[in-house]
Image (cartoon, rainbow, N blue to C red):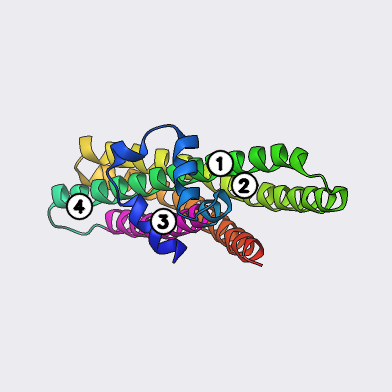
C-alpha cells in the first residue's frame, strides 16, 4: 500500500515536488510513508537505473563493434547509430547519478532526524538500543554508498571514450577512420567490462541493503 501511495505522489508534476525536501518528507509522513521507506524505494530506483545503464553500455559496445567491423555500406548511417547509442548511454548514466543524489539526500535526512530524536527518549535502555540500530544502519548505508559511488565513477571515463570515438567518426567518415577506431575498441571493451562488473557488485550491495532494511 505504501508503495502505491508513493508512486502516486511521484506522479505529481515536478514543480509540485521541487520545493523544500523537508516539507516533502513531512508530507509523505502524513500519508504513512517515512524516510526509511523512501530510502529503500530510492535504492530500488537506483538499482533499476543501473540495470538500464548496463543494457545501454552493452548496446553501445555492440554498436562500436559494428563500426570497427564495417565492410561496406553507408557510413553516415553507421555513425548515426553510434551517436544514438552514445546518447542513450549518456542519458542512462545521468539517470543513475540523479538517483544516487536522491538516495544521499534522504539518507542524510533520515540519519539527522534519527540522531536528533535519540535525545527525546526517557528510557535509557530503549535509547541505547535505538542508537545501536542507527549505528548499524549507518554502517550498512556506508557500504552501499561506497559501492554506488565506485560504480558511478567508472561511467564517466567510458562515456568520454565513447564520445571521443563518436566525434572522430563524425568528422572522418572514411575507411581510414574505421581503421583508427579498431585500435580503440579493445580498451573501451575492457573499460565497459570493468564498469559492468562494478555495477553488478553495486546492484548486489543494493539488494543486500534493501533486504536488511526490510527485516
Picture residue at 29% right of the left edge, 36% below the top: 15
Q: CA distance from mark 1 to mark 2?
A: 8 Å
> Is residue 60 toward the left or the right of residue 36 in the image?
left
Q: Earlier in the sequence, mark 4 or mark 1?
A: 4
| Residue underneath mark 4 | 78
In this view, the residue farthest toward the top is 20
| Residue underneath mark 3 | 6
| Residue underneath mark 2 | 145
Picture residue at 54% right of the left edge, 51% below the top: 34
* Circle 4 SS class: helix
Q: CA distance from mark 1 to mark 3?
A: 18 Å
Q: Residues within 10 Å of mark 2 (few under 14, many from 20)?
A: many
Looking at this view, is 85 or 200 the one in front?
200
Range shown magenta: 41-69
Percent across and percent down for residue 11 are 30, 52
**Residue 67 painted magenta:** yes
* Circle 3 SS class: helix
- Say which of marks 4 and 1 sits in front: 1
Q: Earlier in the sequence, mark 4 or mark 3?
A: 3
Q: Tell me whether the residue at label 1 lies in contact with that at label 2, contact meaning CB atoms closer than 8 angstroms.
A: yes
Amino acid at each position: 500500500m505504501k508503495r502505491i501511495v508513493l508512486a502516486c505522489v511521484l506522479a505529481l508534476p515536478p514543480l509540485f515536488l521541487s520545493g523544500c525536501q523537508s516539507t516533502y518528507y513531512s508530507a509523505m509522513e502524513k500519508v504513512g510513508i517515512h524516510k526509511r521507506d523512501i530510502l529503500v524505494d530510492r535504492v530500488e530506483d537506483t538499482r533499476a537505473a543501473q540495470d538500464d545503464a548496463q543494457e545501454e553500455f552493452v548496446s553501445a559496445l555492440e554498436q562500436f563493434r559494428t563500426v570497427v567491423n564495417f565492410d561496406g555500406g553507408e557510413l553516415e548511417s553507421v555513425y548515426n547509430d553510434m551517436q544514438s547509442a552514445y546518447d542513450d548511454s549518456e542519458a542512462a548514466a545521468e539517470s543513475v547519478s540523479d538517483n544516487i543524489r536522491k538516495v544521499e539526500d534522504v539518507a542524510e535526512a533520515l540519519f539527522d532526524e534519527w540522531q536528533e530524536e535519540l535525545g527525546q527518549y526517557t528510557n535509557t535502555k530503549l535509547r541505547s538500543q535505538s542508537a545501536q540500530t542507527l549505528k548499524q544502519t549507518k554502517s550498512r548505508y556506508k557500504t552501499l554508498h561506497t559501492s554506488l559511488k565506485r560504480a558511478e565513477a567508472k561511467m564517466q571515463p567510458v562515456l568520454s571514450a565513447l564520445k571521443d570515438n563518436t566525434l572522430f567518426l563524425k568528422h572522418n567518415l572514411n575507411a581510414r577512420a574505421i581503421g583508427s577506431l579498431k585500435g580503440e575498441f579493445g580498451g573501451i571493451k575492457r573499460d565497459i567490462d570493468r564498469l559492468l562488473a562494478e555495477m553488478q557488485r553495486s546492484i548486489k550491495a543494493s539488494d543486500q541493503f534493501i533486504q536488511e532494511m526490510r527485516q
